[in-house]
Image (cartoon, helix red, strand yellow):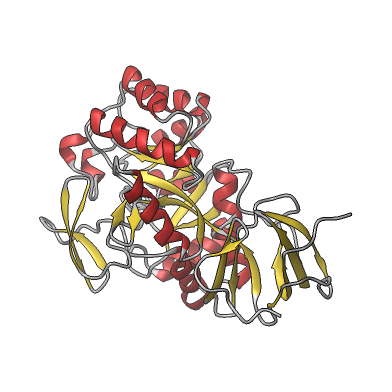
Amino acid sequence: MSPSRELVLGGGRVILADRVLTPGWVAVSGEQIEALGSGPPPPSASVVDCDGLWLVPGFVDMHVHGGGGASFASDDMHEIARAAEFQRAHGATSVIASLVSAPLDALEHQLAALASCADAGLIAGVHLEGPWLSPVRCGAHDPRFLRAPDAGEVRKLLEAGRGCIRMVTLAPELPGALEAIRAITAHGAVAAIGHTDADYAQTRVAIEAGARVATHLFNAMRPLHHREPGAVLGVLEDRRVTLEIIADGLHVHDGLLRWLVASAGAERIALITDAISATGAGDGDYALGGQRVVVRHGEARLAVDQSTLAGSTLTMAAAVRHGVAKLGLEVESAARMASQVPARALGLGGAGTLRVGGRADLVLLDDAATLHGTLWRGEWVGEPPRATR
Ligand SMILES: [Zn+2]
């Protein structure tokens, strides 16, 4: 006898890894997707009518610093859990918690707490953003904490992560950076190019050494120049590199993002939030890695230099909505850029696609990509989307 189907979502358009079921259904049992298919849903004690909605893999935010007033850069597991919970309520069923540049011992303490949260399944991994970044492209990172990668320190931090570090952003032009890229890759994490003043040639060398992600493309790197096209063209040209973008209408001009989608293809672009603790917590004064941040009208900037953006107050749900409304993306494309692309870039096998036996992490979107419900490990986050029958 097959186990009873506890929950069936039927009548919606189901986005699978390689096709869309129109209409299709997804049956959930416990934390897993027990079955899925096209046509009318099978009988079940609890069917959610998803007519007019898209069933999308739960969003994977591969670059996020916090949310709901809580930061991932903490040695307090409760605070880390709160930040993850906030992002989950906005569709990100998998988050890669991002740390900013800090002294070595602070990072080690944060990594210990984050590794425990990863073991508990609260986060999908950790992203070290720094401390091996360029002082001239540091953005909101505290320049006092930036340094060139020392092989011993790289090893120490990777070990402190106990296997939970999935990505490390560094500036490849720094002395020792290529060796670090090889060490990070050998460790099973992804090396990302970012907060960098690398020129075009240095970027190409970094990709050859193993770098596979561009951290918030266009932000905190040399602008594209026709005689020195810098890291931007270096990463664009190589289809092995996944391109992170912050699609909030503020970090990168929407026209440039439309051009990027047309030229690089949606399958290479990952929507990220780069969200800080202030996200969803209102305007005011906040901290980010020891720097004071002022949030006004939802825009986060360094207090000492308000021309410098300090992360965002974006959510994955808002990024996907922006992609559909302002970048002209199909819901299907925007959904994949928020789930499948980042999961593939970081090798997160359990996330990013809807498949039988996989985790029941999914979100419901309408044609404007407005979020109507989030299922995390088979449970609704907050209220169920509609009356079940
Ligand atoms: Zn960041």
Tell me residue 317's x, y (percent): 48, 68
- 199, above or below 218, in the image: above
Q: Residue at x 30, y 56 (%)?
A: 276
- 330, above or below 378, in the image: below
Residue furthest to the left: 304
In which quarter of the view is residue 112 placed? top left
Tell me residue 217's x, y (percent): 41, 52
Residue furthest to the top: 152
Q: Is residue 200 visible?
A: no
Q: Is residue 284 visible?
A: yes
Which of 245 and 358 lies nearest the eye of the viewer?
Answer: 358
Q: Residue at x 49, y 38 (%)?
A: 119
Q: Residue at x 58, y 52 (%)?
A: 341
Q: How many marks can you see?
A: 0
In which quarter of the view is residue 328 placed? bottom right
Relative to residue 35, is residue 78 drawn left or right?
left
Q: Quadrant of the C terminus?
A: bottom right
Q: Residue at x 34, y 49 (%)?
A: 78
Q: Quadrant of the N terminus?
A: bottom right
Residue furthest to the right: 1
Tell me residue 62's x, y (percent): 47, 49
Which of 198 and 165 lies nearest the eye of the viewer?
Answer: 165
Tell me residue 63's x, y (percent): 41, 50
Relative to residue 117, is residue 13 drawn left or right?
right
- 18, above or below 183, in the image: below
Which of 50 and 175 lies nearest the eye of the viewer?
Answer: 50
Relative to residue 42, is residue 340 drawn left or right?
left
